[in-house]
Image: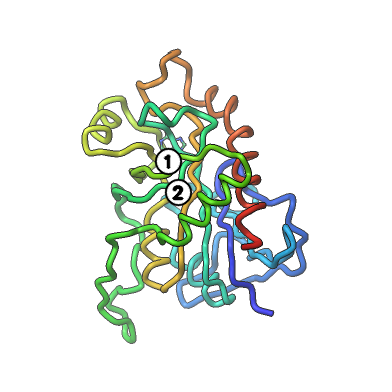
Amino acid sequence: MSTKIAVIGGTGMNSWPGLDVLARIDADTAYGKPSAPLLRGRVYGVEAIFLARHGEGHKLPPHAINYRANLKALAEAGVQRVIAIAAVGAIAPWFAPGEVAVPDDLIDHTWGREHSYSDGRPGSALAHVEFTHPYTPALREALLAAATVAGVQAGAQGVMAVTQGPRLETPAEIRALQREGSDMVGMTGMPEAALARELGLDYACLAVSVNWAAGLSPAGAGIHDEIHASIEAGMAKVRAILERALPN
Ligand code: HPA
């Protein structure tokens, strides 16, 4: 049986304790090795693959992740649907730390990352993939329906700004992202989403607000303190949503 669904876990979900691992796949692709072995196993009655985006031990910074190898390895393992878990900073007032949302659009501020399979190599085709809906609408709807069944309130849309990191932003940068219409900010959403699209994979994101973005904390709290205080509550909501979403 080939595995059709994968979860890419990031900060706060670097492993998946609920997954009964059946195989560790040491994948190697034409673009190199993924961040970690693909863990194929069973969870919530279905087969799924887990990939630790930042590698085993959470060592890879966002700009050093081999996103092309990650997505290619999943595709070569038979995956058709990818659910990306991303811890993000909140810009919109509705997205307090500990809340989850399913973004519907993004703005890419990353640079210098290997961001396309359409790279001019011999054999690669020039493809301008459509990105009007950067997150697969049907998969987004499935996640939102699962959240409803799980009794988890999830933001039904949102614009994700993706910054280069690994440093956090300045308050002026966050005000600029706010003006351009971003509701949340993370460091790994791109090129991940675009590469999934280039490969024809369904891709959607469960974003977990873990802090107010720089300069926005009403309590003036330190970002790392906020992350520490909120991340587990948010990840518990993610697990509850996955438990309902995966079997469907
Ligand atoms: N900015 C960028 N990425 C993040 C943040 C943030 O405030 N919090 C978690 N990931």
Q: Is residue 163 visible?
A: no
Q: SS class of the residue under badge 1?
A: loop
Q: Give the residue type at disc 1.
A: Pro
Residue occupied by mark 1: 166
- Indicate the position of residue 16 as horizontal and vertical percent values: 69, 51
Say left or right for 133 vs 30: left
Looking at the image, is 144 positioned above or below residue 127?
above
Measure the alpha-carbon separation of dots 1 and 2: 6 Å
User: Considering the image in quadrants, where does the N terminus appear?
Assistant: bottom right
- The dot on residue 62 is 2
- Indicate the position of residue 175 as horizontal and vertical percent values: 26, 28
Q: SS class of the residue under badge 2?
A: helix
- Indicate the position of residue 216 as horizontal and vertical percent values: 37, 22
Looking at the image, is 131 positioned above or below residue 106?
below
- Residue shown at 74%/50% (left/top)? 17
Q: Is residue 64 visible?
A: yes
